[in-house]
Amino acid sequence: MSERAVVTAGTGGIGLETAKGLARHGFAVTVVGRDAERGTSAIEEIAAVAAGAAPRFVAADLASLDQVRALAAHLTAEGPLKVLVNNVGAMFPRHRQTVDGIESSFAVNHLSPYLLTELLLDRLQAAAPSRIVNVTSAAVKAAKRTFDAVEPPGGYYGFHWYGRAKLANLAYTLHLAERLRGTGVTVFAADPGGAATSMTDGTMTSPTIVSPPLRLLWPLVRRTFTRATAGPASVAASPSVFAATDASLDGQTGVLIGPGARPATVFRGADDPRTIEKVLELSRRLAPLDGGHSVRHK
């Protein structure tokens, strides 16, 4: 019987290529996405390369904390889980809120994987040795390290707010790695680097997603992510697949796997104890594990 792996946002781009990579390694892969039609197409692609059990699709909108909880309950009922890849990520050109009244970038890029991971820990421990892989981004370097509230002070700039949400998730990843040390569940971050995906072709085309001081440099930044110069999604997925499967990482935890599927230096600030503490406080308040109502937008 094939061991189980879950990939969020696995119906296209980096997530789909990650799912295909895990399927080639013999995992029974479940991909999570919003669109059933895209899910069906993804399952066909994954099945064509699978070395183990047939892949599956589960529909969930990870911008909704209630749907994250429902997804976790569904996956929990299916038994032990060997690999969880939190690949979900989104950048928004304009300020928006989720159905929970939480700023969308923070909800999708951090709270969603945080909550799903916490709710699946017992299933991951049941399959130990098991791995958690959280996909991060070099955009954390452009983030404000302020987490007293869900939204940072100042104007809304999609690239910076995306980076801040990814920074929150990276800080959580490093905390979780230490918290689970010795349990058999190891935790990794994976940075795909520049990748040609729908997000980079769409949201990242406008300089208004960065603050005014950086707009003169925007052509240089954007060039890294455009389809003409960035690597294909299959290459960008290699850090996630490596982090999830490679035997050289056995016994290690809290490692960042960078572009080229090589261990990299963790971005400065992500391991700051004060940042971690603030991120955890905010996460527990906005996404309580008991399913209670979150404290909205404060």
Image: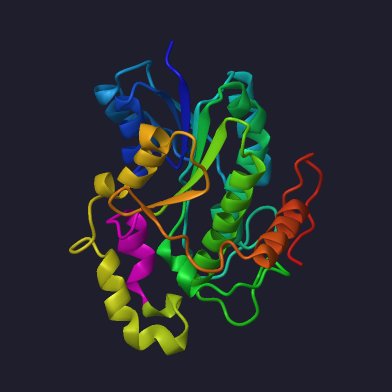
Residue 162 in percent (x, y) is at 50, 65
Q: Is residue 89 above or below residue 1?
A: below
Residue 156 magenta-highlighted: no
Q: Quadrant of residue 9?
A: top left
Q: Quadrant of residue 198?
A: bottom left
Q: Which residues are magenta?
A: 192-206
Quadrant occupied by the N terminus: top left
Residue at image position (59%, 58%) is 171
Quadrant occupied by the C terminus: bottom right
Is residue 243 found left or right of 172 in the rendered image?
left
Residue 261 in percent (x, y) is at 31, 47
Residue at image position (47%, 83%) is 211
Residue at image position (27%, 68%) is 224
Instruction: Kindly tell me whether residue 286 is visible in this rendering.
Output: yes
Q: Is residue 146 above or below residue 154?
A: above
Residue 205 magenta-highlighted: yes
Q: Is residue 216 above or below residue 195?
A: below
Residue 265 in percent (x, y) is at 42, 60
Residue at image position (23%, 60%) is 230
Number of numbered tags placed on the structure image: 0
